[in-house]
Amino acid sequence: KAHEIAYKDLEELKNKDYISRGEFETYFTELSDIVRHYLENRFNIRAPEMTTEEFLNALRHGKMFSREHKDFLKDFLSHCDLVKFARYDSDVGEAQKSFSAARSLIDQTKEEPHDEQISDNK
């Protein structure tokens, strides 16, 4: 399942300890990639191949995300891009907040197993 892969990838990212070494560019690049691959695996969106702008444009026209999730993805990916491309100086607090936000997005959008017992008891 897409969310299980993403959770494993998040755990591996945390274990790489980029934050304590101040390697924020690498950290945010990998964090962004984890979220993009999760979205690709979960919703069949070609997120890893798109620029952030292309991806957000595709989201705008789609109906699979709530406004809240669309706004979150816009802010999240824009922040990752700032660190990756604009040499924005991030800090430990922002890195941890972004990690928690990514995990929360996965928690809220993961595929839920269908409860088959309900249909069997009719």
Image (cartoon, rainbow, N blue to C red):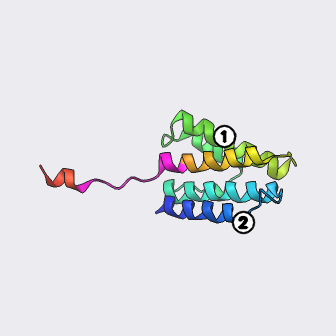
Residue type, label 1: Lys
Q: Which residues are magenta?
A: 106-116
Q: Are marks 2 and 1 in contact (CB under 8 Å)?
A: no
In the rendering, at what x and y percent does residue 20 appear? 79, 57
Residue type, label 2: Lys
Magenta stretch holds residue 69:
no
Say left or right for 113 vs 58. left
Q: Secondary structure at mark 1?
A: helix
Other residues around mark 2 within 10 Å, as few (<14) / some (14–19) / many (≥20): few
Q: Which residue is mark 2?
A: 16
Q: Nearest the camera: 108 or 69?
A: 108
Q: Residue at (67%, 58%) from the top-left corner? A: 33
Residue at the far top: name it.
Answer: 67
Other residues around mark 1 within 10 Å, as few (<14) / some (14–19) / many (≥20): some
Q: Quote the CA–CA distance across marks 2 and 1.
A: 26 Å
Q: Nearest the camera: 35 or 43?
A: 35
Say left or right for 25 vs 15. right
Say left or right for 121 vs 15. left
Q: Residue at (81%, 49%) from the top-left corner? A: 83
Q: Secondary structure at mark 2?
A: helix
Residue at the far left: name it.
Answer: 122
In the rendering, at what x and y percent does residue 25 appear? 81, 55
Q: Which residue is mark 1?
A: 74
Magenta stretch holds residue 114:
yes
In the rendering, at what x and y percent does residue 6 appear? 56, 60
Q: Quadrant of residue 8?
A: bottom right
